[in-house]
Amino acid sequence: MARIMDKPLIGVVACRSITEGHPAFTLHQKYLDAIMDAQGVAIILPHRPGQGEAISRRVLPLLDGLLLSGSPSNIEPWRYEATGKEELTDPGRDELALALIAQALPLHMPLLAICRGMQELAVATGGTLYRQLPVGEIAHYVNSDAPLAAQYAPTHAIQLASDGRLSQLLRGMTSLQVNSLHQQGIHHPGPLLQIEATAPDGVIEAVSVPHHPFAFGVQWHPEWRYQHDEASSQLFEAFLHACHQYRKEKRL
Ligand SMILES: N[C@@H](CCC(=O)NCCCC(=O)O)C(=O)O
């Protein structure tokens, strides 16, 4: 096992919520466990509206990778030029996450963006979102009253781009069964992102940034019991491998 000082440091943006009446920064432990099981050190990044850019500049040089987690909150619509009110927001997270992505991409810092994180990656690079996915043959959203094991069980297939980098990373896999806990989704991916996977109804399920060593977004949750799923384990192993590499090159 690697010494802790040799492990890459991965920043994970916190979510703002209310816990026992107190404003709190929270993060599901599964995201941090997946990083730490894969031999990384996770560090939670709190935020403060108005200081996202500055906090990002301060912390990025300390990090070797960035993980953007899922969250029930939605990105404020004005950030992708949509109109209308949004009840469930986390403006501080929007600000810090978008600043971190904008600053991390040119550095070629490894980035894994999950669910809301993938939507942040799209918005940060000029894409837009569906504020509510149309109801169709595939239910992308699972009843949040169901037991966790049911919520995070695979519900539908996705097709991986046959010549894509994700398929390559997953040793030639062309389709996967994934879980699905989102009501929004990427509408236009913007000029920078490559589509790596889609659901049968056309919903974008994974994206990457071309010419970047490791910048992937996935709409599903690979962190959920990732040790029990081959594709999820490979994704986390590849992410941590890229973070190790980044750390090594940064220190040369
Ligand atoms: N609010 C967005 C993003 C959905 C999302 O990230 N869901 C996961 C929440 C719980 C978790 O982190 O496991 C949308 O509805 O599309």
Image: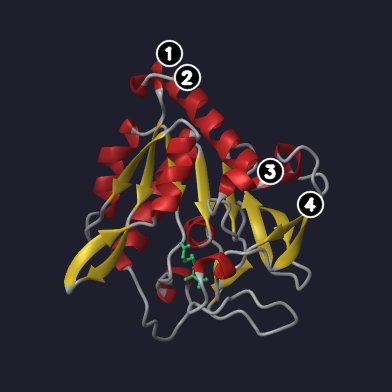
Q: Residue furthest left?
A: 22
The residues bearing labels 2 and 4 have C-alpha atoms spaced at a distance of: 30 Å
Q: Which residue was labeled with disc 4? A: 161
Of the residues shown, which amino acid type is indicated by label 4? Ala
Q: Which residue was labeled with disc 1? A: 252
Q: Which residue was labeled with disc 2? A: 249
Q: Residue at x 52, y 76 (%)?
A: 146
Q: Which mark is residue 230?
A: 3
Render colour scheme:
secondary structure
Q: Residue furthest top?
A: 252
Q: Nearer the viewer, residue 40 or 217?
A: 40
Q: Nearer the viewer, mark 4 or mark 1?
A: 4
Q: Nearer the viewer, residue 64 or 154?
A: 154
The residues bearing labels 1 and 3 have C-alpha atoms spaced at a distance of: 33 Å
Q: Nearer the viewer, residue 237 or 131?
A: 237
Of the two numbered discs 1 and 3 on the same chain, state the one appearing first in sequence.
3
The residues bearing labels 2 and 1 have C-alpha atoms spaced at a distance of: 5 Å
The residues bearing labels 4 and 3 have C-alpha atoms spaced at a distance of: 18 Å
Of the residues shown, which amino acid type is indicated by label 3? Glu
Q: Nearer the viewer, residue 82 or 156?
A: 156
Q: On the image, which quarter does residue 137 sit in?
A: bottom right
Of the residues shown, which amino acid type is indicated by label 2? Glu
**Residue 181 position within the rendered picture, expressed as x and y whole percent measured from the top left:** 56, 69
Of the two numbered discs 2 and 4 on the same chain, state the one appearing first in sequence.
4
Q: Which mark is residue 9?
A: none
Q: Nearer the viewer, mark 2 or mark 3?
A: 3
Q: Residue at x 39, y 20 (%)?
A: 6
